[in-house]
Image: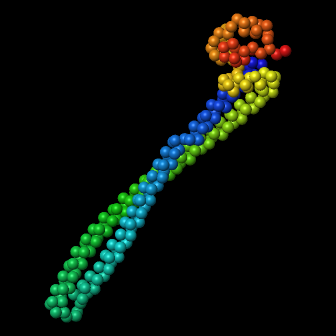
């Protein structure tokens, strides 16, 4: 009978420890940290992405300006080398204008090339950031899966322990169980084994009178130090 009480105690301890572990899992700092990391990377990705859009708009505008300039220059060259006769002053103006445009085209082409490099770099940066986001997401969900499995296992363990307790309680006389539960609510445990005259609940030697009570098979014997049940005689 004492063994049944000890078994109830063990299962109660298992439930307590499992519930504590569950509580710890539910306020998991690692998950929160990963979520924060993901948000930060996402913000970084957005910045890179909008920068890339800006660079691409810039390239488009540069191309438009270049095309327009080239067209204008073509027209001026057609006038200059065409068959129509112009006065020298006008020819000088045309030549100056063409030179200016040539210069501007060269500078725009340089800008355009730099913008293309910038586009390439932004693309690479965006790809790296995108991969990082996927990695963090994968890690997050893997971790979540592991935690969920732990929670399911813990709940199963608790259910088994609760069933064990119910099964044991059925076999314990009501008077003894009530006394045991009363002790449990005060001390945490209500029964203890006796080993060489020492109560394992409080690690104290019990008195000779108590030993006599056990020898005389008194129905419930308590430790005279801590009050836990150390013997029960089933009549
Ligand atoms: Zn004791």
Residue extending farthest to the right is 235
- Horizontal and vertical percent position of residue 74: 28, 83
In which quadrant is the N terminus drawn?
top right
- Horizontal and vertical percent position of residue 189: 68, 23
In which quadrant is the C terminus drawn?
top right
Q: Can you say whether 175 is above or below 60 in the image? A: above
Q: Residue at x 25, y 75 (%)?
A: 104
Q: How is the image coloured?
A: rainbow
- Horizontal and vertical percent position of residue 117: 33, 62
Q: How many marks?
A: 0
Q: Can you say whether 81 is above or below 155 in the image? A: below
Choose between 103 and 23: the one closer to the eye: 23
Question: Does residue 10 appear in this view?
Answer: no
- Horizontal and vertical percent position of residue 195: 67, 11
Choose between 28 and 42: the one closer to the eye: 28
135 relative position to 224: left or right: left
């Amino acid at each position: 009978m004492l063994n049944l009480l000890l078994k109830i105690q063990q299962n109660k301890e298992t439930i307590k420890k499992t519930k504590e572990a569950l509580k710890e899992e539910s306020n998991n700092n690692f998950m929160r940290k990963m979520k924060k990391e993901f948000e930060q990377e996402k913000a970084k990705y957005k910045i890179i992405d909008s920068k890339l859009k800006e660079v691409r708009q810039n390239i488009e505008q540069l191309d438009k300006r270049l095309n327009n300039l080239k067209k204008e220059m073509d027209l001026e060259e057609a006038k200059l080398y065409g068959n129509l006769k112009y006065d020298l002053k006008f020819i000088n103006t045309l030549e100056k204008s063409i030179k200016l445009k040539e210069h501007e085209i060269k500078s725009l082409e340089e800008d355009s090339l730099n913008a293309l490099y910038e586009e390439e770099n932004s693309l690479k940066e965006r790809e790296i950031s995108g991969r990082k986001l996927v990695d963090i997401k994968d890690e997050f969900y893997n971790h979540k899966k592991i935690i969920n499995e732990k929670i399911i296992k813990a709940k199963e363990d608790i259910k088994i322990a609760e069933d064990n307790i119910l099964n044991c309680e059925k076999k314990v006389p009501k008077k003894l169980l009530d006394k045991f539960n009363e002790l449990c609510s005060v001390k945490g445990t209500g029964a203890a084994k006796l080993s060489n005259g020492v109560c394992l609940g409080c690690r104290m030697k019990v008195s000779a009178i108590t030993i006599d009570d056990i020898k005389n098979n008194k129905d419930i014997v308590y430790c005279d130090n801590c009050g836990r049940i150390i013997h029960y005689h089933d009549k």
